[in-house]
């Protein structure tokens, strides 16, 4: 969920800064060209284009829970996303992109039940929030979209294996399609807390008896 190269994805002034932060998850990840997209006459109508939102519940998103990381060979940056397990009709998430021990961007994320559907709320640091509507949900994937002016933005998460996930971002303006895919690997969540743990646990005394 997510920091893509802003130059590549300045597709329209109407695209909200919040959505660019969903792209923020990938500014440091290596982008691959978007797959070919069939013409509109051959594509199902997405919720962003006027169809009813997809049906589902965050209870279907247990596979997303945990810590995920993507490393960029291009600029050496690291993208980290942490998602809590579904609880009380919500899934909370936090995104962080950093390089050389310096945070590039951060983002608060929340997927939540609304009626018989799911919404995705994104709030990047220093930017306006945005809410996306559910298109499809299954096992194990979830896809959202939002229309801003003439631009439709789509974001999809799909688990490929127990340790691999792909986040897909697409921008559509008429027949113009742009986007990229970002590969994430599941990592041990304990790694996120190690520095704090080390600071809180006192070092053993020099004369401590070894057990």
Image (cartoon, rainbow, N blue to C red):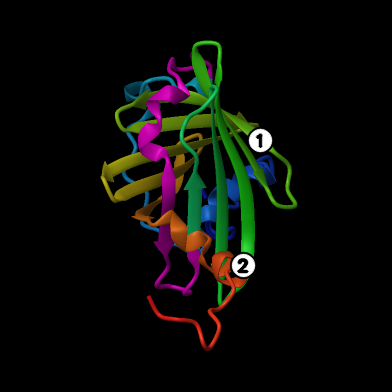
Q: How many discs appear?
A: 2
Residue plotted at (34% across, 37% down): 37
Q: Is residue 69 magenta?
A: yes
For the question of whether residue 11 can be seen, the reply is no
- Is 94 located above or below residue 69 in the figure? above
Query: Which badge, 1 or 2, is on the more N-terminal residue?
Result: 1
Q: Which residue is mark 1?
A: 130
- Circle 2 crowding by C-alpha within 10 Å: few under 14, some 14–19, many from 20: few
Q: In the image, residue 25 lies at what x, y percent?
A: 52, 54
Q: Choose between 100 and 148: the one closer to the eye.
A: 100
- Is 78 located above or below residue 176 in the figure? below
Residue plotted at (47% across, 38% down): 155
Residue plotted at (45% across, 36% down): 175
Question: In the visual, does 132 lie left or right of 56?
Answer: right
Mark 1 → mark 2, Cα distance in angstroms = 37 Å
For the question of whether residue 56 can be seen, the reply is yes
Label for residue 200?
2
Label 2, secondary structure: give it.
helix
Q: Choose between 119 and 153: the one closer to the eye.
A: 119
Q: In the image, residue 20 lies at what x, y percent?
A: 61, 49
- Circle 1 crowding by C-alpha within 10 Å: few under 14, some 14–19, many from 20: some
Residue plotted at (42% across, 38% down): 156
Q: Choose between 91 and 201: the one closer to the eye.
A: 201
Q: Is residue 113 magenta?
A: no
- Is 121 located above or below residue 58 in the figure? below
Q: In the image, residue 116 lies at what x, y percent?
A: 49, 11
Residue 44's quadrant in the figure? top left
Instruction: Look at the image and tell me in which quarter the C terminus lies.
Output: bottom left
Q: In the image, residue 57 lies at what x, y percent?
A: 45, 20
Residue 36's quadrant in the figure? top left
Which residues lie in the magenta part? 50-78
């Amino acid at each position: 969920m997510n920091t893509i190269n802003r130059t590549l994805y300045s597709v329209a002034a109407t695209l909200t800064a919040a959505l660019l932060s969903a792209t923020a998850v990938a500014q440091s990840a290596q982008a691959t060209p978007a797959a070919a997209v069939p013409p509109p006459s051959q594509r199902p109508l997405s919720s962003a284009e006027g169809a009813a939102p997809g049906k589902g519940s965050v209870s279907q998103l247990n596979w997303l829970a945990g810590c995920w990381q993507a490393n960029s060979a291009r600029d050496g940056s690291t993208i980290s996303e942490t998602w809590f397990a579904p609880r009380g009709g919500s899934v909370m998430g936090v995104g962080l992109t950093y390089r050389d021990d310096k945070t590039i961007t951060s983002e608060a994320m929340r997927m939540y039940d609304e009626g018989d559907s799911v919404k995705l709320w994104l709030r990047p640091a220093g930017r306006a929030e945005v809410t996306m509507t559910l298109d499809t949900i299954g096992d194990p994937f979830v896809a959202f979209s939002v229309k801003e002016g003439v631009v439709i933005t789509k974001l999809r998460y799909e688990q490929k294996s127990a340790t691999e996930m792909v986040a897909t971002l697409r921008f559509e303006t008429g027949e113009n399609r742009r986007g990229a895919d970002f590969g994430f690997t599941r990592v041990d969540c304990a790694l996120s807390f190690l520095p704090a743990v080390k600071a809180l646990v006192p070092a053993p005394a020099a004369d401590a008896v070894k057990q």
